[in-house]
Image (tube, helix red, strand yellow):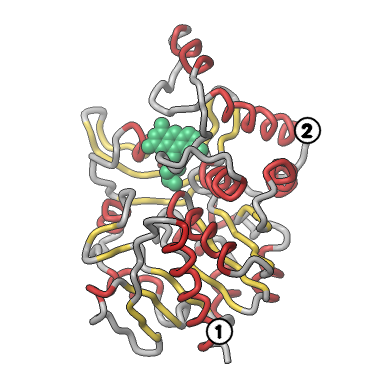
């Protein structure tokens, strides 16, 4: 069985861990969001790729959902001692090694796909992890604060500002000239079906869908999504702030409509959202909380069962 999944950060990675547990023999290809990527201290950081790689590779800081477990922050403290900015992004010592390896490979001319493959060779995530694109595209957010109206990198809005300043608009800079990474379209084409995990529909799944060619490739496949919103609130993270920024209500219904029936064939919602409906999409209510590995595997099995039924 060949499955393709689009994924962002924490929610997507946890769901994928359940998916891998649910169908250990399936060939799973993950198309990872790179819109969160940022260059800091001369190093290229790919938060969502690393969250998938560490989560599935067994090195994730479980309570944070990002970064490494058993971390220390000596380098961060030394950088702060030199007064270099930014100091608001928590890079740990072990995590720095990943960014150093990635940066020196990029510097040597390897593509992000080749770098990701090399890093995954160590972590063995048990899925094929492809960046959505090898071309640089970064999510930026337009805000107005005491420094006036300006665009800031997504990470500054997300981490330094905690999305406390309203996002007037969110743009994936570089999307229009970016190409899907090698293997992305072929993986979608070869997939038996596609699963959209409960990642952020705007800055994770939505970002990947903006890479020319990816959304079109998906409309020809059986696609089942899992709602990231339960009863009007995101399960975690700040998807509500992102949805508000694009004028979409924070509800399972609104996210379903945002993805649209041309993309989705099936949609899993929480029991309290069982009234959600959209012409041409099979909606099913299931417990969505990924409270532990068994619950997560159960949710993944429900998504698989729906996809298999719809792809007959
Ligand atoms: O809320 C935070 N998220 C941090 N994240 C998460 C990051 O902002 C992700 O992009 C979001 O979680 C969205 O997926 C990191 C991810 C990394 O791979 C490496 C370092 C960080 C540091 C932080 C941080 O200091 N605070």
Vertical arrangement, residue 176 with respect to residue 167, above or below? below
Residue placed most toward the observer, 254 or 305:
305
User: Disc 2 designates what residue?
Assistant: 108
Residue furthest toward the front?
294
| Residue 291 in which image quadrant | bottom left
Task: Say which of marks 1 and 2 sits in front.
Answer: 1
Answer left or right for 31 relative to 80: right
Residue furthest toward the bottom?
312
Determine the secondary structure under disc 2.
loop
Q: Residues within 10 Å of mark 2 (few under 14, many from 20)?
A: few
Residue placed most toward the observer, 132 or 191:
191
Q: Position of residue 89 (x, y in %)?
A: 43, 28
**Which residue is at 38% across, 25% downward?**
88
- Does any atom of ligand 1 lie closer than 8 Å to the CB of label 2? no
Residue placed most toward the observer, 131 or 310:
310
Q: Position of residue 130 (x, y in %)?
A: 65, 55
Return the mark for residue 293.
none
Quarter of the figure that contains the N terminus: bottom right
Vertical arrangement, residue 163 with respect to residue 194, above or below? above
User: Disc 1 designates what residue?
Assistant: 308
Q: Position of residue 145 (x, y in %)?
A: 23, 33
* Lower sequence index among marks 1 and 2: 2
Q: Position of residue 152 (x, y in %)?
A: 38, 37
**Which residue is at 53% across, 27% downward?**
40
Which quadrant of the frame does ligand 1 lie within? Answer: top left
Residue placed most toward the observer, 23 or 161:
23
Quarter of the figure that contains the C terminus: bottom right
**Which residue is at 47% across, 77% downward?**
263
| Residue 96 in which image quadrant | top right
């Amino acid at each position: 069985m060949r499955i393709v999944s689009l994924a962002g950060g924490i929610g997507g990675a946890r769901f994928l861990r359940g998916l891998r547990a649910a169908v250990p023999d399936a060939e799973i290809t993950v198309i990872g969001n790179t819109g969160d990527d940022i260059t800091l201290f001369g190093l290229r950081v790919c938060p969502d790729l690393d969250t998938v790689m560490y989560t599935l590779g067994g090195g994730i800081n479980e309570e944070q959902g990002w970064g490494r477990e058993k971390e220390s922050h000596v380098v961060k403290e030394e950088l702060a001692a030199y007064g270099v900015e930014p100091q608001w992004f928590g890079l740990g010592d072990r995590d720095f090694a990943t960014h150093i390896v990635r940066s020196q490979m990029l510097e040597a001319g390897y593509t992000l796909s080749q770098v990701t493959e090399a890093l995954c060779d160590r972590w063995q995530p048990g899925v094929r992890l492809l960046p959505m694109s090898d071309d640089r595209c970064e999510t930026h957010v337009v805000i107005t604060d005491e420094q006036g109206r300006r665009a800031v990198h997504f990470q500054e809005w997300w981490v330094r500002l905690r999305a406390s300043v309203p996002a007037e608009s969110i743009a994936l800079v570089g999307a229009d000239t970016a190409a899907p990474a090698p293997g992305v379209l072929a993986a979608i084409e070869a997939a038996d079906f596609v699963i959209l995990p409960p990642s952020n529909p705007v800055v994770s799944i939505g970002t990947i869908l903006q890479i020319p060619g990816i959304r079109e490739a998906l409309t020809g496949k059986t696609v089942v999504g899992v709602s990231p919103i339960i009863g009007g609130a995101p399960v975690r993270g700040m998807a509500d702030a992102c949805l508000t920024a694009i004028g979409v209500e924070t509800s399972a219904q609104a996210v379903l409509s945002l993805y649209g029936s041309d993309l989705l064939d099936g949609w899993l919602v929480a029991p309290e959202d069982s009234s959600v409906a959209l012409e041409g999409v099979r909606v099913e209510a299931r417990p969505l909380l990924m409270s532990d590995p068994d619950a997560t595997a159960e949710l993944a099995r429900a998504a698989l069962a729906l996809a298999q039924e719809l792809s007959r």
